[in-house]
Amino acid sequence: MMLFLDFDGVLHPNEAFMTKTGVVLRCDGHNLFEHAELLADLLEPYPTVKIMLSTSWVWTLNFKKAKARLPDLCKFTRNQRLDCPGRQRYRMAGQ
């Protein structure tokens, strides 16, 4: 079974922005990847599930850096990526 995972709006609110210093979440009371551990716990009984990263983080940061943001989910994450160039979600701060 394959789970296509976007980060924004799934693992944290859809308010992540790329800045010159990295990705920041502009949503008071929330943190980047705040639901990653919960997703890992939910998937634990299903070891055959594989995660395909279908997130703009892959082509904004690169696959290795995007996957590194998911330490609790790495065992589920496939070593490939899904390109979706029409779905850019990051905007430079101030745009």
Image (cartoon, grey):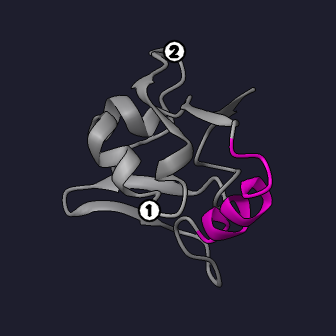
Q: Residues within 10 Å of mark 2 (few under 14, many from 20)?
A: few
In the displayed structure, 66 sits above or below 24; it is above
- The image quadrant where one finds the C terminus is top left
What residue occupies the far bottom of the structure in this picture?
A: 29
Q: Nearer the viewer, residue 57 or 95?
A: 57
Q: Amino acid at mark 1?
A: Pro
Give the magenta part as a residue range: 34-47
Q: Please report the residue visible at 61 percent of the width from the left and 39 percent of the height from the top.
A: 6
User: As drawn, is 24 to the left or to the right of 9?
Assistant: left
At 63% from the left and 69% from the top, the residue drawn is 37
Residue wearing tag 1: 71
Residue 21 lies, with reference to residue 73, above or below; the image says below
Front residue of 41/25: it is 41
* Residue 42 image label: none
Q: Is residue 95 visible?
A: no
Q: Secondary structure at mark 2?
A: loop
Residue annotated with mark 2: 86
Q: Is residue 19 visible?
A: yes
Q: Quadrant of residue 49?
A: top right
